[in-house]
Image (tube, helix red, strand yellow):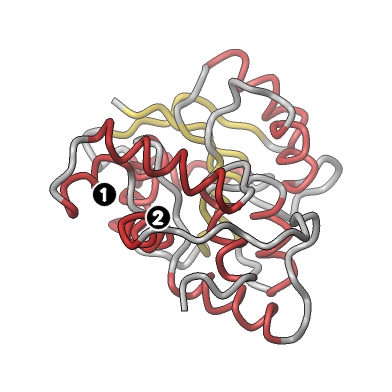
Amino acid sequence: MIRVLVVDDQTLVRQGIRSLLGLSGDIEVAGEAGDGREALAAIEACTPDVVLLDLRMPGYDGLWTLGELRSRTDAPPVLVLTTFDHDTLVMDAIRAGARGYLLKDVTLERLTRAIRTLADGGTLVSPSITERLLRAVHRGRPPAGEPPAKVQPLTERELEVLRLIAEGCSNREIAEALFLAEGTVKNYVSALLAKLGARDRTNAVLRALHENVLG
């Protein structure tokens, strides 16, 4: 069972998400929080596998929460679930450490798939988010904090793995798609992170987009 923490300042939204996820069969809401400070305490108390996080909340908002979690080595992956889809906000959330980004009008099927992907170690850089990042890069606004040095060339296999990461695939899904052992995929991921100078999978996609590695 995948344990989820729902962080949203609206009680009705939290109750609705709880009810919907209860239909999945393999996902349960282990806790709820109304802002970032409550979220940090709830993470300690219920140790969720995935955090569903709203961005705009009074007081300690989603970006503050992501910043706090980023310094924790044992922090659970965060899936942003919000009504706001501004380009800058998307990029800020991803740079702050969000492993996925969805709008609240998402279908239950897509939401549960995203939760499973993050719980399995994957990221959710959906095509719409990738388009936003590309537009920002084309406008001359490269992701802040990226190392200026050029990336090292990737092998064709590493590029295949990177493209699947950009589609939100977990290591297991990449292994199945490329007919590789999961341990081999982990080695490829480690290699491409080093070559891209990236700290994690989402940052690797941002770096690849900035350097036009994905074409």
Camera-side residue of 99 and 138: 138
Against 120, residue 80 (above or below) is below
Dot 2 alpha-carbon crowd within 10 angstroms: few under 14, some 14 to 19, many 20 or more: many
Residue at 38 percent of width and 51 percent of height: 114
Residue positioned 52% across, 64% down in the render: 103
Q: Nearer the viewer, residue 111 or 174?
A: 174
Tell whether label 1 touches label 2 (CB within 8 Å).
yes
Residue 57 spot, x, y in % from top left: 76, 49
Check the picture and name the quadrant holding the N terminus.
Answer: top left
Q: Residue at left 69%, top 24%?
A: 72
Q: Is residue 47 above or below residue 159?
A: above
Measure how far apart labels 2 and 1 are at the Cα level. Answer: 8 Å
**SS class, disc 1:** helix
Residue ID for mark 2: 165
**Residue 23 figure quarter:** top left
Q: Amino acid at mark 2?
A: Ile
Q: Which quarter of the figure has residue 127?
A: bottom left
Q: 10 Å neighbourhood of mark 1: few (<14), some, or many (≥20)?
A: many
Q: Position of residue 146 (x, y in %)?
A: 74, 57
Q: Amino acid at mark 1?
A: Ile
The residue identified by callout 1 is 174
Residue for point 34% across, 36% down: 120
Residue 113 left/right relative to 147:
left
Give x and y (percent) for residue 203. 60, 52
In the figure, 76 relative to 167: above or below? above
